[in-house]
Amino acid sequence: MMNALKSALLTLALTLGVISIHPAHASLSQSPALASDQASTPAAPFGRCSAPTPSVQTIRHSWIQPIVHSSNTFGNPLFRQESSCRFRADSRFSAPSASPEDSLNHYRSELNRLFTYIYECPSSQRWAASDSFGLFAKAVLDRYAGRDFPFGQIRNLNYFQASDGSFRMLNWGIPDDNGTVSYKALLQVRVSQFGDSSSALQSLDLDYRKPTAKKDRPRSQTSLPPRSYTYIIYDMSDMSLYQPYPEQLECTPETWWGAFYYSCIERQAEGKTYYTFLGWNAGQPLYQQSVIEVMYIGEQGDVHFGAPLFANSGRVPGREPMPVQVADQDYRRVVFRFGRRTGMILRYDYQTYLVTNKRGKPKKVNADMIVFDQLMPQQIAMSDDYAYYVPQGGVYQAYVWIDGKWRLQLDVEARNRE
């Protein structure tokens, strides 16, 4: 009786998997070939009966290990979360097995495919589609850090690149069914580890101001160390809805006043390079906005939006002349607000404006300038409601770059169609 009970308990334990029998203790009647196969074949992971289907993330993870600083990764285990919205990359990586041309064509077609989903899928899925595009675009930016990639061939995506390669930007909008649009941007900034400024040279304690014979120079002064770059990618989300009056704000990538940029102007002032963007914003439900935004980059790759470069001479740009107490002298950015059923001109163009010479006579000056319509309310009683502002036909103002600032000019003859 006891032997039968022990045999029953042993059978139950084997069935439930509480205990197991080592292959060495298996029955001698088992086939040697079968025992050999079972011993050499590793156990499959729990819950997985076959290899996973390759995805964008798994393919990307096979050739790069980035650090993503973003709040929109939705817990993706392939990315390590950080507190800010930075994505730091390094230009040294292992290339994929495909040829460079095949890889480029694959990435380009995949970016086009993912970007199309943002506008073709239902509104409830557009943000997820934008996040998928953003993740893959970050990988491509990192993969081609310091090298050319045809981002300009992606339909409906705005792409900007600095003339010296110090930054490049991908910019797009996410439309909603109520007519409003939110904006996203990926900004890749190049940072020199050696340093481009004279302060970096001074930190090396090298004196190049005294020309001496090469044989008399210390060994460290005969040549500069090779310059190497790292790249930072900022994942920027539109915060304009929470900052309706940003004329005096200095923003960062985390507080970016989003827009859909269509033009960029590069200017130098006081040793800094300023990038002036012209853009459009449809984030407000009752009116739309056009913006003149300024961006500059610090030595450590820190990005700033907004700089006091707009000298308005006591006037509100795009409006009737107003006293100095109403309009601040220097704006950090300029925002125009007007009705959703109209449009306004805002472009960088070569036009003519009038100035007064020393004798008090008007003089015509031709120059490149940022030209825009002067706006007015449809009725005087509606002057406080931007939804009823429209362009005042044929009346233009402009910003002209003079002495390191954008200076407001009221009398502009915007007749040059070229």
Image: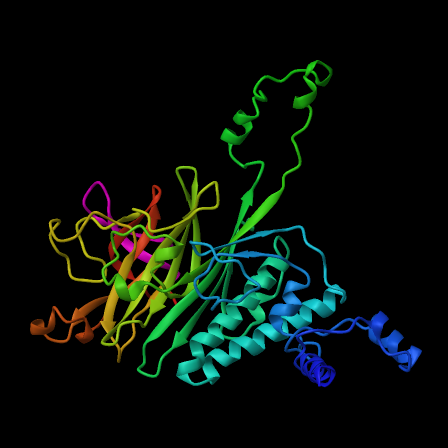
Q: Is 101 in the magenta? A: no
Q: For the point 52% across and 75% down, which residue is it?
A: 115
Indicate left or right for 220 with 409 as reference: right
Q: Is 353 in the magenta? A: yes
Place residue 72 in its image quadrant. Answer: bottom left
Q: For the point 52% across and 71% down, which residue is it?
A: 133
Q: Residue lying farthest top?
A: 216
Question: Split into 4 quadrants, where in the image is the N terminus?
Answer: bottom right
- Give coordinates of residue 305: x percent, y percent: 36, 52
Indicate left or right for 306 with 121 as reference: left
Q: Pick the residue in front: 312 or 337.
A: 337
Q: For the point 34% across and 41% down, which residue is it?
A: 403
Span shown in magenta: 348-369
406 lies above or below 242 = above
- Give coordinates of residue 381: x percent, y percent: 7, 73
Place residue 96 in its image quadrant. Answer: bottom right
- Give coordinates of residue 114: x percent, y percent: 55, 76
Q: Is residue 133 visible?
A: yes
Question: Split into 4 quadrants, where in the image is the C terminus?
Answer: bottom left
Total numbered badges shown on the rendered structure:
0
Q: Is the magenta stretch mostly helix, strand or loop?
A: strand
- Give coordinates of residue 273: x percent, y percent: 44, 45
Q: Residue lying farthest left?
A: 381
Q: For the point 63% across and 39% down, which residue is it?
A: 227
Q: Can residue 396 be seen in this view?
A: no
210 lies above or below 148 = above
13 lies above or below 358 = below
